[in-house]
Amino acid sequence: MTIAERVKQKRIELSLTQAELAKRIGISQQSLQKIEDGRTQNPRKLLNLAKTLHCDAEWLLLGVTSEVRESASTYTNKKSASTANFRPIISSQQAAQWPTLSELEKQNLDYLEVPESASASSFWLNVVGNSMMSASGLSVPEGYFILVEPCLTAKNGDLIITKLPDSQDVTFKQLVIDAGCTYLTPLNPNYRPIEAPNNLTIIGVVTQAQIVF
């Protein structure tokens, strides 16, 4: 079954017309029609589409649920995050400075639940872009939240958050060490690996990914 067939099947199950569904997710009926006839394979508003159709975004796109995905949690206001099982959601710019954030920045953060094994220095980051989304195998689509562990040492094959020299934010890639060379490799085959510079800064290792509605 293709994404076009899955979208149409879910829309029919909910007794929605193309016009009704398009309006709910904020796109034109023509755009939805392109999804349902197979011309659009990677919808721009995938998360809105999945939420409206009451299904998992990764299943809608790929027909599977990746092993890296765990059960979805929910946001919690920072004022109610009084237990040790919550960590902050920070931006890619903040991740580049982690853990040296100002007190004001820390006060304005939201929190998300973590496993008991998570370290005190771990944090959540929202995935932007589709460079880590794959049609087969391991896949972390845009919109997922990833849990980053700064205290872990990155090994070959790990998914990592790293800061490139002269960059103001971080990048999310797979660490690949081959024939003595280190590469930052996207899971999406449409993107090329980046040869890592000698002064590469690894912020942390990704240990979990999940979608949050």
Image (cartoon, grey):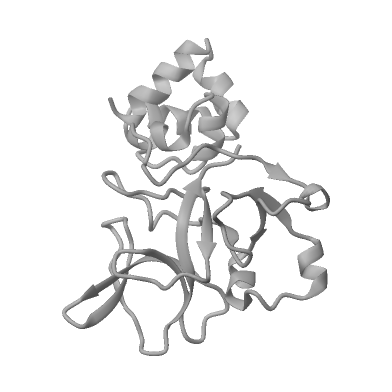
Q: Is residue 7 above or below residue 118?
A: above
Residue 11 image point, x, y percent: 48, 18
**Looking at the image, which is closer to me, 180 or 190?**
180
Residue 151, x across and y down, in percent:
52, 71
Q: Residue at x 27, y 46 (%)?
A: 137
The image quarter in which residue 169 lies: bottom right
Tell me the residue at 52%/10% (across/down).
15
Q: Is residue 205 above or below residue 32?
A: below
Residue 97 sits above or below residue 175 on the image: below
Q: In this orientation, which residue lies closer to the viewer: 156 or 168? A: 156
Residues 34 and 101: in front is 101
Residue 75, quarter of picture = top right
Q: Pick out the residue farthest to the bottom.
A: 198
| As drawn, 113 above or below 40 | below
Most distant residue in the front direction = 117
Q: Position of residue 156 (x, y in %)?
A: 29, 69
In what quadrant of the picture does the N terminus appear?
top left
